[in-house]
Amino acid sequence: MPEQNGLKPMLDARQVDELLRRVYPQLNEHYDFYQTVEVFPGGCTVRLNADERHLRPGGTVSGPSLFTLADIGGYVCVLSHAGPDALSVTTNLNINFMRKAEAGPIDGHCRILKLGKSLMVFDIDIVAGPDRHTVAHATGTYSIPPRRSNDTVK
């Protein structure tokens, strides 16, 4: 994806995953299902390594699993580009499911549409399968907490 208006990440993929392990340990409590694959100027790529735990009847990856991937994509973008404040929160997330996703790696290609002082708007294209077809698309907004004079990683 192209760079979005000069946005520069403050954290790389490894640093974001380390932060997530520290501030959000329940995300990958026993397994590394959700991963940050890449952080780049204006976006990121996240992955769900879906297995039988993520399937609903019919062998389809569940909507809540894909929704979580979309939300994690936004969180990774806000943490890596607005700063590592773990108190950033989702204020809106809208998802459209396009087609069935089966177990295996599912990637979310996330881009920042607007990064302001208090809000970040993003979209994410979720792709899966051997042909990497879009299985879902989401748009969302994260609220960025105001900076405090003694800000450090929380």
Image: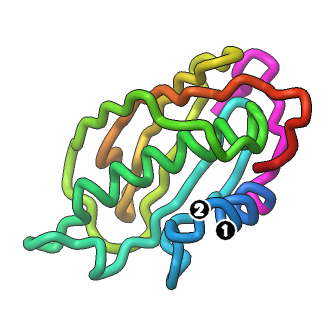
The amino acid type found where label 1 is placed reads Arg
- Kindly identify the residue that appears in the image at 70 percent across and 66 percent down: 22
Q: What's the CA distance linking mark 2 and mark 1? A: 6 Å
Quarter occupied by residue 87: top right
> Which residue is more in the foreground, 87 or 139?
87
Q: Quick one: which residue is furthest to the left in this view?
A: 58
- Badge 2 vs badge 1, beta-carbon distance below 8 Å: yes
> Which residue is more in the foreground, 142 or 121?
142
Q: Which residues are magenta?
A: 1-14
- Kindly identify the residue that appears in the image at 73 percent across and 26 percent down: 3
> Which residue is more in the foreground, 127 or 13?
13
Residue 135 is labelled as none
The amino acid type found where label 2 is placed reads Tyr
Image-based side of 19 in relation to 126, left or right: right
Q: Residues within 10 Å of mark 1 (few under 14, many from 20)?
A: some
- Kindly identify the residue that appears in the image at 51 percent across and 70 percent down: 26
- Vertical side of 145 occupied by 37: above or below: below
Q: Looking at the picture, how far across and down is residue 114, in whole percent? A: 61, 17
Q: In this figure, which residue is indicated by the disc labeled 2?
A: 24
Q: Main secondary structure of the magenta part?
A: loop
> Which residue is more in the foreground, 46 or 128?
46
Image-based side of 56 in relation to 13, left or right: left
Q: Quadrant of the N terminus?
A: top right
- Vertical side of 92 occupied by 108: above or below: below
- Kindly identify the residue that appears in the image at 56 percent across and 54 percent down: 46
Q: Residue 86 magenta-drawn?
A: no
Residue 21 is labelled as 1
Q: Looking at the picture, how far across and down is residue 81, in whole percent? A: 75, 34
Q: Residues within 10 Å of mark 2 (few under 14, many from 20)?
A: few
Q: Looking at the picture, how far across and down is residue 76, in whole percent? A: 63, 46
Secondary structure type for disc 1: helix
